[in-house]
Image (tube, rainbow, N blue to C red):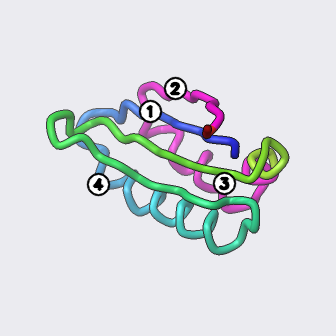
Amino acid sequence: MFVVIVWFDILPSRMDELLPLIRENARRSIADEPGCRRFDVCLDPHAPDRCFLYEIYDDEAAFQAHCQADHFKSFDTASAHLVARKEVRILRLV
């Protein structure tokens, strides 16, 4: 399994704008992408401007399909002005 984790540092006081966008991206990823097995959106109660995604795909090809999906591209464009920093890590589930 192909695991992707993403840390977002959100611009101050912009989380309320980001959450509907990111939740829709997660919902559509699970519903519309056969290779997407899990897509969790997590918030840190001690860091109100941080968001963490935990995603599991069948393989790298499924993740690449996610990156090309219209809903992902829409999310990426709509959220860009809300994000101060984004860190993506690729892992392998053992």
Q: Earlier in the sequence, mark 3 or mark 1?
A: 1
Query: What's the amino acid at mark 1?
Result: Trp
Residue lying furthest bottom in this view? 31
Q: In the orientation shown, which residue stands out farthest toward the right?
A: 61
* Residue under the point 31% across and 36% down: 50
Rendered residue at 49%/46% (across/down)? 54
Mark 1 secondary-structure assignment: strand
**Chain-order first, disc 1 or disc 2:** 1
Label 3 packing within 10 angstroms: few (<14), some (14-19), many (20+):
many
- Pointer 2: what residue? 87
- Would you place residue 28 above or below residue 58 in this image? below
Q: Residues within 10 Å of mark 1 (few under 14, many from 20)?
A: some
* Disc with the residue nearer the chain's start (4 vs 1): 1
Q: Amino acid under label 3? A: Phe
Taking the spot 41% from the left edge, 63% from the top edge, the residue there is 20
Residue for badge 3: 72
Q: Circle 4 sits on which residue? A: 16
Q: Nearer the viewer, mark 2 or mark 4?
A: 2
User: From mark 2 to mark 4, how far is it between C-alphas?
Assistant: 20 Å
User: How far apart are the alpha carbons under marks 3 and 1?
Assistant: 16 Å
Magenta span: predominant SS is helix
In 3D space, how far apart are the residues under numbered discs 2 and 3 (Cα atoms)?
Answer: 16 Å
At x 63%, y 61%, the residue is 37
Residue 7 numbered tag: 1
Q: State the count of labels.
A: 4
Q: Are marks 1 and 2 in contact (CB under 8 Å)?
A: yes
- The range drawn in magenta is 65-92
Residue 92 x %, y %: 65, 34
Q: Is residue 39 above or below residue 60?
A: below
